[in-house]
Amino acid sequence: MSIGLGIFLLLAGAILRFAVNAQVGWLDLALTGNLLMIAGAVVTIIGLIVLFRRRRTTVVERSTVDGVDRSHVVDRADDPLDEPAYATTLDRSRRSDPGV
C-alpha cells in the first residue's frame, strides 16, 4: 500500500509541477509539486525497504522414537508461501544399552 501511495504522490507532484499552467495567488504550484514528488519518492523507498526486508526463522522439531533421537531443522522466511531454504534431518542414536 505504501508503494502505491508513493507512486500516487509522485505522479500528483509531477502533474502539479510540469502540467498545470494555472496561477494561484496563495499557493505556489511548482513548489507544491516538488514537495509532493519528494514525499512520494521517500514513501516509495521506505515501502520497498519494508517489502524486501525479510525475517528468517529456524524451526527445530525433535522427537524420540524407539530410542532414536531425530531432529528436523527448517530455515524459512516468515511468509508461509515460501519454500524452505533447506531442510535437514539428523539421526542420532541415544540408546542406553549399545547391544540393543
Image (cartoon, grey):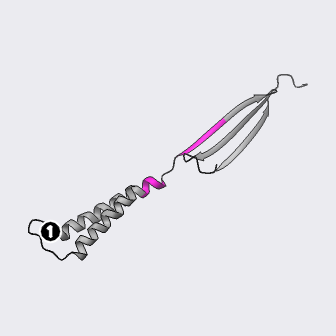
Left or right of residue 37: residue 44: right
Task: Name which quarter of the figure residue 39 lies in.
Answer: bottom left
Which residues fall within the magenta stretch?
48-60
Q: Looking at the image, which residue sits at the far left?
A: 25
Circle 1: element type? loop
Q: Is residue 78 above or below residue 99?
A: below
Left or right of residue 79: residue 31: left
Residue at the spot 87% in from the left edge and 25% down from the top edge? 98
Residue at the spot 26% in from the left edge and 67% down from the top edge? 13
Residue at the spot 54% in from the left edge and 45% down from the top edge? 78
Q: Pick whichever, 21 or 59, lies toward us.
A: 21
Q: Pick whichever, 96 or 76, lies toward us.
A: 76
Q: What amino acid is found at the position of numbered circle 1 in the picture?
A: Asp
- Which residue has dot 1 on it? 28
Location of the N terminus by quadrant is bottom left
Q: Position of residue 52 (x, y in %)?
A: 48, 55
Q: Is residue 55 above or below residue 12?
A: above
